[in-house]
Image: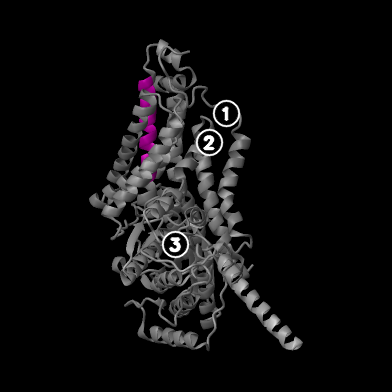
Amino acid sequence: MEHLLTAAFLGSLLLGAVTAGVPLLLAGLGEQISEKAGVLNIGLEGMMLFGAYFGFAVAYQSGSFALGFLAGGAAGAVAALVMVLLCVRLGMNQIVVGIAITLAGEGLTALLHYFTFARSYPRLDKIGTLAVPGLSGLPVVGDALFNRSLLVYLAVLLPFALIWVFRRTQFGLNLQAAGDKPAALDAAGVSVMGTRAAAVLLTGFLGGLGGAYLSTVGGGLFLPFMTGGAGFISIVLAMLARGKPLWVLFGAFLFGASLSLTTAMQVAGIDVPTDVIQMLPFAMVILVLVVFGRHSYLPPALGLPYHRGER
Amino acid sequence: MGAARARWGVAAAALAVMAGAAMAGSFALGAQAAEVKSIAVLTPEQGTDYGWNQQGVDAAKAVAEKYGLKFMPAEGLGYGDVRPTLRELSEEGASLMIAHASGYNTAAPEIAAETKTPVAIVDRPDAMKPGLVADYTLYAHEGAYLAGEMAALMTRTGTVGIVVSGEPPSWNAQSAGFAQGVKATNPKVKIVYAVIGPAAYSDAAGGRRVTESVISAGADVILGQGNGSSFGMIEAVETTKATDGGDVWFIDVIGDKSSIDKGHLLSSVMWNMVPVYSAMVEDLKAGTFGTKRYRIQLADDSVKLLKTKHIPADVWKTVMATRDKIVDGSVKVDLVTDAEGVRKMMSSVAAK
């Protein structure tokens, strides 16, 4: 096992943890915004798939990862428009519509892939990185954590930005009110639908961005169903984190680190069944968030449509 | 006279018993000769993946043409519930439904019982039912043995890797065959083994992540077994240097990805499922469907190694010589299909 304790191997595990964690972080934070405003966005998986397809397609055609990320985010937001229309505007069941968006995402992106990339399977090169002066040279962790793409740094800063938005801005307070007491927000002259619509669109954008990262950086290519439940894991992260963005950050990277740990355990030859090893990321994240995040808070109006005049 | 009458009586009774047994047998087997007019194949991903899905669809199409059957493909169904699709295909008159994914091996027998349309499934030989359910779990361990020999001959770092997106019996057989080939060729070569996830067949990002780690652990030849996730493994091989600074080789399974290769595809353990599907049609016609196992092997080229321009001539010659020895029986490759048995054969585990 000693021969495995090399900088290259440990670095690759850390890098794997970051790469696996970023899509969950982005999508989980998006879900948290939506939930804060009272909309349970079960369609996140579908939005991620739309983002993954269009993010990859644009990055491949343009040669620009940045454009790919923007396209992925935009595609996720467009998918979220369906939820805005059907759930926020028409008050339809959020779970049913969410499942429909996920199924549509799976089917449509698989179809698009079939007509575009299913015979050529184009693959992207590695994304360019931005070294943090003074830190990127650290042994083992330097390259894995401090020599990453700009989006990784932005994703890590996003929870802090959201904390500020939630606590210090009018929009943040409106989000809170839309999820806690939408009638009070309405009475204060602020549009509940407008607030919830903005939240859902932001969720779609961040979910799509996460999907784009998964396809362009994580895989380097797009495949049908490639999210493999990442959207649902993000929803679980957001719900267990109960309104606290830093818990999403922690949970996402704990999940990524656990995935890397499973690889390390296998490569190192820990003699336990693979199924047990593969279960670790899920068990670990649920355990930690249930134990430490149980005092957090879920909005009372979560999942409930708002109809003006109803109590 | 009495003795002769008794003998006739015994003979008549024996005949009656035999006839009864034959009738009971035919009822028990439930296998009656059937007219085969169409063949349907259901795949989780599109039949354009240069792998499991494509080989399945292409083989079913070839068999349909061979026997003049209507071809009914249902591709890209995902890994969810395929019961509605199976019912639909049955209603449309499918004579045989090939459920081409291990994830379908619970739903397909259920629908077969419900609609009385024969189905073929993988990875569940226990579910075989005469006339109704056949299992075609295929083992290409002989081909994987040759791939292992090739990997042992080609490695510079002395470490080779196996990355799999799941541990179904078919892939376990290949992992074990590969390990046997490596060890028989050079016992000093280390084998690093990693599973992406319990069923990460389309997890390209996971395939890339795990393969990068296996390369960082020293492997410079990777045997990759995955459906879509294989492309993630290939991406890792193309964008990551081995620990000695050189290129990493990739050995694929089931299909031929050389048309999309960027210079890292060393070989592939190729499967030809046409003989298997042909045998299913013949068995349906003969009333023996669901009564026997199907196999692929080096001897009839239903398993063979892909020859690419990257394989040195002397390596290919050595490997082909071993192929002949396997075919004539002078080299035996053990069939290991359980995950625990596979892991015991890996250096990384044995080193504990």
Query: Tag 2's secondary structure?
Result: helix
Query: Tag 1's secondary structure?
Result: loop
Q: What amino acid is found at the position of numbered circle 1 in the picture?
A: Ser
Asked if residue B222 is among those painted magenta in the image, a careful observer would answer no
Extent of the magenta region:
A193-211
Query: Tag 3's secondary structure?
Result: loop
Q: Chain of mark 1?
A: A
The answer to whether the residue labelled 1 contacts the one labelled 3, judged by CB atoms less than 8 Å apart, is no
Q: Quadrant of residue B188?
A: bottom right
Looking at the rendered image, the quarter that the N terminus of chain B falls into is bottom right
CA gap between label 1 and label 3 equals 40 Å
Q: Position of residue B127 (x, y in %)?
A: 56, 61
Residue under label 3: B226
Q: Position of residue B179 (x, y in %)?
A: 53, 74
Disc number placed over residue A296 in the picture, else none: 1
Closest to the observer: B205 or B122? B122
Q: What amino acid is found at the position of numbered circle 2 in the picture?
A: Trp
